[in-house]
Amino acid sequence: MAKRWSDLSPRTRKLIIVAGVAEAGLKAAAAIDLKRRPADQVRGPKWAWFAALFVNSAGLIPLSYFVFGRRRDTTVG
């Protein structure tokens, strides 16, 4: 059964807002990084990572991009 916003406790409302802001921030950071990063430094097609950012993922897709989607720079010095 779906609840209305007004039925939620103030604590639950704050948690939902904080989680939404955190997810939006992660998605924005991932999108900016994808835009600036050359395609050869991204694992997989850039368009697929961009498309995945539109999925409601509780922040898991942007985090997986930062962990698995970016190639590490192997040049030293």
Image (cartoon, rainbow, N blue to C red):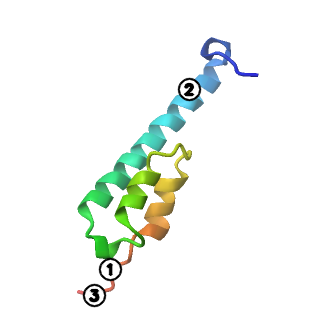
Residue at 42% across, 41% down: 24
Residue drawn at x 42%, y 52% is 51
- Distance (Cα) linking label 2 and label 3: 45 Å
**Split into 4 quadrants, where in the image is the N terminus?**
top right
Q: Secondary structure at mark 3?
A: loop
Nearest to viewer (mark 1 / mark 2): 1
Name which residue lies at 47% across and 41% down. Answer: 22
Q: Is residue 57 above or below residue 69?
A: above
Left or right, 43 with reference to 38: right
Q: Amino acid at mark 1?
A: Asp
Q: Residue at x 27, y 66 (%)?
A: 37
For badge 3, the amino acid type reads Val
Camera-nearest residue between 52 and 63: 52
Q: Which residue bears the numbered disc 1?
A: 73
Give the percent coordinates (x, y) of residue 17. 51, 29
Describe the element under mark 2 as helix, strand or loop: helix
Q: Which residue is mark 2?
A: 14
The one of 11 and 1 positioned closer to us in this rendering: 1
* Amino acid type indicated by mark 2: Lys
Quadrant hosting residue 75: bottom left
| Quadrant housing residue 33 | bottom left
Question: What's the distance in space between the residues labelled 1 and 2, CA to CA?
Answer: 39 Å
Sequence-wise, the earlier of marks 1 and 2 is: 2
Quarter where residue 72 is shown? bottom left
Residue 42: x %, y % from top left: 36, 71
Label 1: which secondary element:
loop
Q: Residues within 10 Å of mark 2 (few under 14, many from 20)?
A: few
Q: Which residue is mark 3?
A: 76
CB within 8 Å, label 3 to label 1: no
Cα–Cα span, label 3 and label 1: 8 Å
N-terminal of the two: label 2 or label 3?
A: 2
